[in-house]
Image (cartoon, rainbow, N blue to C red):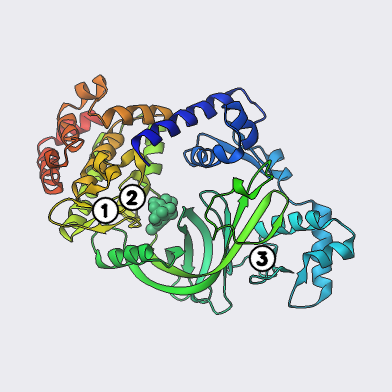
Amino acid sequence: MTMAEKHTNNDLENKICTFLNDKEDGATALQIAKGVGLKKASDVNSVLYRLEKTGQLFRNSDQPPIWSRQKRSAATVKNSQPTDALAEELKKMMLSDGKSNGMKSYHLAAKLNVPRSEVNKCLHGLSRSGEVKRLGETSLWKVDETNGGGRLIKYKGEFQDCSIELKEDSRFFRDFELVSVLGAGGFGCVVKAKHKLDGKIYAVKILENTIKASREVKALAMLKHPNIVSYYTSWDEEAFWINEFNDDDSTTSSQYPTDSEQRDSCSSANGAENSGRDLSCLFIQMEFCEKGTLNDWIKKRNEGTKNKFKKALHMFRQIVSGVEYIHSEGHIHRDLKPENVFIGEDETVKIGDFGHVTITSSSPVSRTSETGTLIYMSPEQTEMVYDKKTDIFALGLICFEILWKMPTVSEKLKLFENLRRQIFPEDFKNKYATEHHIIRKMLSQTPAERPDVKEIAKYLEDFLLRNSTALEQKSA
Ligand code: ATP
Ligand code: MG
């Protein structure tokens, strides 16, 4: 995305938020699109999902999604569940059928004398709640007697509901008990799982086995450091991966994401289009960081009364130490941000998510567009010619965010836009004169003017040693 496109997107985000501010009952994507002067739901869908991810919008029902600035209420959630009576009839019918090879939806519809679209809609709802499952790529449905117990992993993807159906002989299913889904992105998901033999809890990342995934696992396996998430093992297995695109007011399939593979639909129900495929999946077993992400810590700190300056600086020092090691091993992380920094046992800070890692070279080189998160991204990374100094720019923004409370997302976006041009709040400059000096250098437009991570580490060491009393005072 170019900077110009980014600005257009920000404008659209603001317009959508303003439009929804006085829509108490929310609005569908089509209504929102028209409200902001556009034509189709697909003109705003990706922005809506992004706003949902950053906590600025909520989806109050799934079919169709109703978007609003308010969190969903119990009543609206209930509306998105399948009709109870029909659901019960369907399950009874499938169980009494006694066949282990499932039933077709038209067969169920005919037996119950209910329109097929109703049956489909209900089956998809039941599938989302783990009560029924579809067998392989067929249109055969069956009651899931395991109720998702480990063989079915359901999660909310970036733009859709997803589920990963593991095979009978799945290694994950054999060795682990699924505890919960920790997070998800465009790539797949990360689950919390208990190992059946050693009884320990792990984080297992499940993603399509691509070259990018292989780069991620190789980097993680190679990097061993107290401030980097520990890697245990990895393996691949076949799984049936289903992406369900929920859409509203949809009349044509052009409203869905354009990836034709993703639209390789198996069957559809009103308001939802499902695509499923057998995929080779990579499973990465890693240390579970029980205290969440640095982003969670920052959010909590922002809600409290103290600024926790001393703790913040110690955490930042650990991040720097992790990055120093990553760079010394010849890698660039490329997606440093608080969501990718985890907090483990004893509050140790650990860098994770090597989904965008790459290898350094002696001079800046032209690279692919597979890059990290826009607001933390250095200016040159958006232009695709960069070196390890790109991580320093992100570190500068993280250092500011860890020190300075920004209570709302919009405030953060506004401040970051200024920081990216080395413009700091006056209060910050007064209160944190020394830190301002180093962060400013880290945010230099010219990569060569940014300090390297060794200099930052040294600076922090000296500073922390010299100022322990001052730090106590600033933390109050
Ligand atoms: P990518 O940037 O590669 O597309 P992503 O950002 O969605 O992927 P991760 O950052 O690896 O993927 O993980 C997503 C979420 O899963 C994290 O934000 C976090 O909530 C959770 N998570 C990941 N790894 C761990 C871990 N080791 N311990 C605890 N939670 C984790
Ligand atoms: Mg991440």
Q: Is residue 6 above or below residue 233?
A: above
Please, what secondary structure does the residue beneath circle 3 have? loop
2 vs 3, front mark: 2
- Mark 3 = which residue? 147
Mark 2 or mark 3: whose residue is earlier in sequence: 3
Check if mark 1's residue and mark 2's residue have beta carbons within 8 Å: yes
Q: Which three-letter amino acid code belongs to the residue tagged 3?
A: Asn
Q: What residue sits 69% from the left and 45% below the top?
A: 251
Ligand 1 closer than 8 Å to label 1 CB: no
- Mark 1 = which residue? 367
Q: Position of residue 237 (x, y in %)?
A: 48, 74
On-image quarter of the C terminus: top left
Q: What residue sits 67% from the left and 44% below the top?
A: 250
Mark 3 or mark 1: whose residue is earlier in sequence: 3
Q: Is residue 476 above or below residue 386?
A: above
Check if mark 2's residue and mark 3's residue have beta carbons within 8 Å: no
- Mark 2 = which residue? 371
Quarter of the rendering containing residue 90: bottom right
Which residue is situated farthest in the bottom direction here?
169
190 relative to 399 in the view: left or right: right
